[in-house]
Amino acid sequence: MNKELVIIPTYNEKENIENIIRAVFALETPFDILVVEDNSPDGTAAIVKRLIKEFHGRLHMMERKEKQGLGTAYIAGFKWALQNHYEYIFEMDADFSHNPKDLERLSSTLQNNSTDVVVGSRYITGVNVVNWPMGRVLMSYYASAYVRMVTGMNIRDTTAGFVGWKRKVLDTIDLDKIKFVGYAFQIEMKYTALKLGFHIMEVPIIFTDRTLGESKMNKTIFREAVFGVINLRKRGLMGKIKPKQPD
């Protein structure tokens, strides 16, 4: 059986974390879950610890001392997944903006196609976003267009955070060289995978903004995404994106 892992970063997600965990474990596909917990003051970790007893062997938690950014949380999760021999690794938010049922479509796409990375895309069939104000929809949509223009990536949803990876991709990327820590991390990972010769496929999803808890988006994160892609493109043009060297 192929081992499949869903990585869920958390910071102050007590309203959502139990429900999202139960929703993933209710699926027919036997996904495991790794929660990367950044010392939430609201007690998120205590909820996960209680559930670990119920879902022994399938639910895991990595506790970090402080909030260090989305990118570093996923990098830590990727390394853990590789060390524990998972074949398919998925990124997913804790707040139900990504529908857990779509995990099975992402998994099926990875396993039944010659693709290496699958993206749950908000924009591949138009604009499939629910509960966002129009200003944020336009900002996100045109941010992806800007990224495509600068980097040359042929991906409609470059900033998507609902992503599945084959093990060989994460094994090839030098995760220690990934520079961005905010949402630009999502851009950098996709761009790096493409530069290393991997194939990315988008599948349409409906993105629903969180109804519980607070958004983690801020101006610093947005600024990193806007200006960071220029440096990312320069690194690509200069041949600085290379596969990880063997230990």
Image (cartoon, helix red, strand yellow):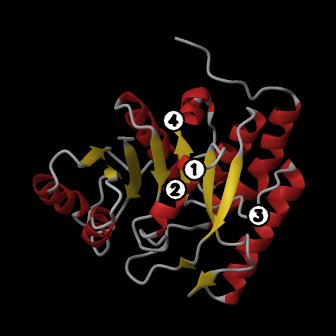
Camera-near label (2 vs 4) is 2
**Residue 38 x, y percent position in the rendering:** 35, 52
- The answer to whether residue 224 is seen in the rendering is no
Indicate whether 206 appears above or below 174: below
Q: Quadrant of residue 120?
A: bottom right
Q: Contact, CB < 8 Å: mark 2 with mark 1?
A: yes
Residue at image point 62% right, 21% down: 244
Q: Secondary structure at mark 4?
A: helix
Residue at image point 43% right, 70% down: 101
User: Residue under circle 3?
Assistant: 156
For the residues marked 3 and 1, what is the alpha-carbon distance in whole angstroms?
22 Å
Numbered label tally: 4
Q: Quadrant of residue 9?
A: bottom left
For the residues marked 2 and 1, what is the alpha-carbon distance in whole angstroms?
6 Å
For the residues marked 4 and 1, what is the alpha-carbon distance in whole angstroms?
15 Å
Residue at image point 63% right, 38% down: 179
First in residue order: circle 4 vs circle 3: 3
User: Residue under circle 2?
Assistant: 108
User: Residue under circle 1?
Assistant: 112
**Badge 3: residue crowd in 10 Å (few <14, some 14–19, many ≥20):** many
Q: Secondary structure at mark 1?
A: helix
First in residue order: circle 4 vs circle 1: 1
User: Which amino acid, mark 1?
Assistant: Asn
User: Which amino acid, mark 3?
Assistant: Arg
